[in-house]
Amino acid sequence: MPHYRYRATDASGTVVKATTESRNERDLRDALLAQNLDVTQIKPARRLRDVELGKKRVPLIEVMQFSRQMATFVRAGISIPEGLDVIMESTPSKRFRDVLHDVSEAIVRGVPFSDALAEHENLLPPYYIGLCRAGELTGRIDMVLEQLAEYIERDLDARAKVKSALTYPAIVLGMSLITVTVLVGVVIPKFSKFFKEFNTRLPATTRALVAVSHVSSRLWFVFPVIGAAAVASVVWMRRTPRGRVLRDNLLLRVPVIGEVVKCAILERFCRVFGSMARAGVSLPEAIQAAADSTNNTVYEATLLVVQEEMLAGAGIAEPIANSGRFPRTVVQLLRVGEATGSLDHQLDNAANYYNGQLTYKLKKLTTLIEPAVVILMGLIVGFVALALVSAMYGIYRAPNLVKP
């Protein structure tokens, strides 16, 4: 059975943290409630043997298409099992087909739709099941599924913008590394042998270039080790709690990139929180789902504190403001939403605003990265060319080459 880490408060107000096994998150929550524990957080617990190099979740595009199709079927009066059978036939992902098959069988046995999905919660986005459960309780499952499809589509669009903005700089940087490797590993050693045939002193730039080539050829085994260490570091920062904390802190502090990451987090938080508030989910549960959707441990920890203050009766806007992680724009819109009862509408406004900001900052990031990479490549190639040309010119002018 899967392992879960939970955080709860007992009757005396003591915070309880532990890791335990359970069939799914819902069963664990029910078991903790039976022990008179007020649950504030439940998250899957990763063990070392559970670490995978590949992605475990179902592709978001498959989840988006499923949500949109299922919303259409429900609105047309088609039963959920029948809709699942139709969708399974056109789903290219084998993993998702297996999920839909299990969900369909569970529903036929009398299990609610959201509970059937909860059996595969690790394969779906963290906010997905909570919204579906709220849609079932309010009788608006078709509307909730449509909202989920729209949100996932925006999320995929934002990810595509990030990839598009970084593709060209990544290609140029890769070509730069290949060029430098060929020059240092192949071209320079041949020129070095050629230079040794002449009894003349080489320019400082050429001597430096030859020295770099010699060191690289002798210590070639260091580069694979550095590459392996880099890959291991990336995996560690993606798959371990400490690594994710370090990664997320670094990303938020890097100039320009940190602003892009923060805009993406704020847009995702406002969009999910607004969707769950509109679906009638309680605000503490909505905060929990929105925190999970940020994919950033710094903001998850911040929103956990906000959730605890909300449970103590502090509202939503003031804890958000006191956290220091959210700009005044978000805080002010939350205050207006609380005062007027239009929290979901104000959160949508904030999400649309930060979506625009994300597009602008991505363009700014691209504008800065592209010339920087091109200039770096030009400087490296230019330095190599200058070193070789100056050496050839020095050899040509050497006195022992002048004929009487």
Image (cartoon, helix red, strand yellow):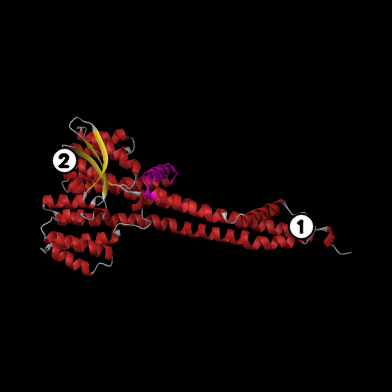
Which of the two marks, 1 or 2, is nearer to us in this view? 2
Mark 1 or mark 2: which comes first in sequence?
A: 2
- Label 2: how many Cα within 10 Å (few below 14, some 14–19, many 20+): some
Identify the mark at residue 33; answer none if there is no mark.
2
Does residue 155 appear to the left or right of 147 in the view shown?
right
Amino acid at circle 1: Gly
The stretch drawn in magenta includes residue 223: no
Report the residue marked by disc 1: 394
- Per the rendered image, the range of residues in magenta is 238-256
Task: In the displayed orientation, state which residue is furthest to the top.
Answer: 12
Q: Does the residue at mark 1 contact the one at mark 2 (Cβ under 8 Å)?
A: no
Element carrying mark 1: helix
Spot occupied by residue 107 in the image (x, y as percentages of width and height): 13, 59
- Does residue 220 appear anywhere in the picture? yes
* Distance between mark 1 and mark 2 Cα atoms: 84 Å
Amino acid at circle 2: Leu
Spot occupied by residue 223 in the image (x, y as percentages of width and height): 55, 55
Q: Main secondary structure of the magenta part?
A: helix
Q: Quadrant of residue 396?
A: bottom right
Q: Quadrant of residue 284?
A: top left
Considering depth in this image, is 31 or 134 the residue closer to the camera?
31
x 45%, y 49%: residue: 233
- Label 1: how many Cα within 10 Å (few below 14, some 14–19, many 20+): some
